[in-house]
Image: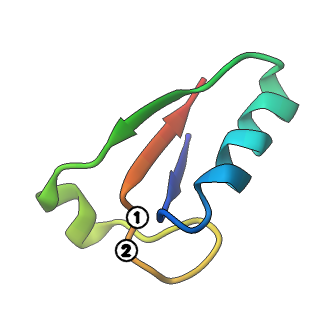
Amino acid sequence: MYFSCSEHIDMAIEDIVDYYALPPKIDKLTEEEQLSTACKYCDSKALYRIDK
C-alpha cells in the first residue's frame, strides 16, 4: 500500500503496476487520515491511498 500526494500519484500507480502487474485501487483519504499520513515520495500530506 502506498500513500501519495497529488504530485506523486503517477509514481505510486506505476510502482503498484510494476510490482503486482495489476491495476491499482485508488482511494481518497479522509481529512483525519490526511493529518497523520505523509506521501511516500516527499514529506507532503498524502491525499490518496493506492493499493493492489
Q: Quadrant of the C terminus?
A: top right
The answer to which image quadrant residue 24 occupies is top right
Depth check: give the residue in front, 14 or 34. Answer: 14
Q: Amino acid at mark 2?
A: Lys
Find residue 33 and name its label.
Answer: none
The residue most toward the bottom is: 43
Q: What is the count of numbered marks?
A: 2
Q: Gap in Å between the C-alphas at discs 2 and 1?
A: 4 Å
The answer to which image quadrant residue 8 occupies is bottom right
Residue pointed to by mark 2 = 45
Residue pointed to by mark 1 = 46
The residue most toward the top is: 22
Q: Amino acid at mark 1?
A: Ala
Q: Residue 6 location, x and y as percent? A: 48, 63
Look at the picture and state if 45 lies above or below 25. below
Query: Residue at 36% of width from left, 58% of height from top?
Result: 47
Binning the other alpha carbons within 10 Å of mark 1 as few (below 14), some (14 to 19) or many (20 upward) gives many
Query: Residue at 77% of width from left, 42% of height from top?
Result: 14
Q: Are marks 2 and 1 in contact (CB under 8 Å)?
A: yes
Look at the picture and state if 6 lies above or below 51. below
Query: Residue at 45% of width from left, 80% of height from top?
Result: 44
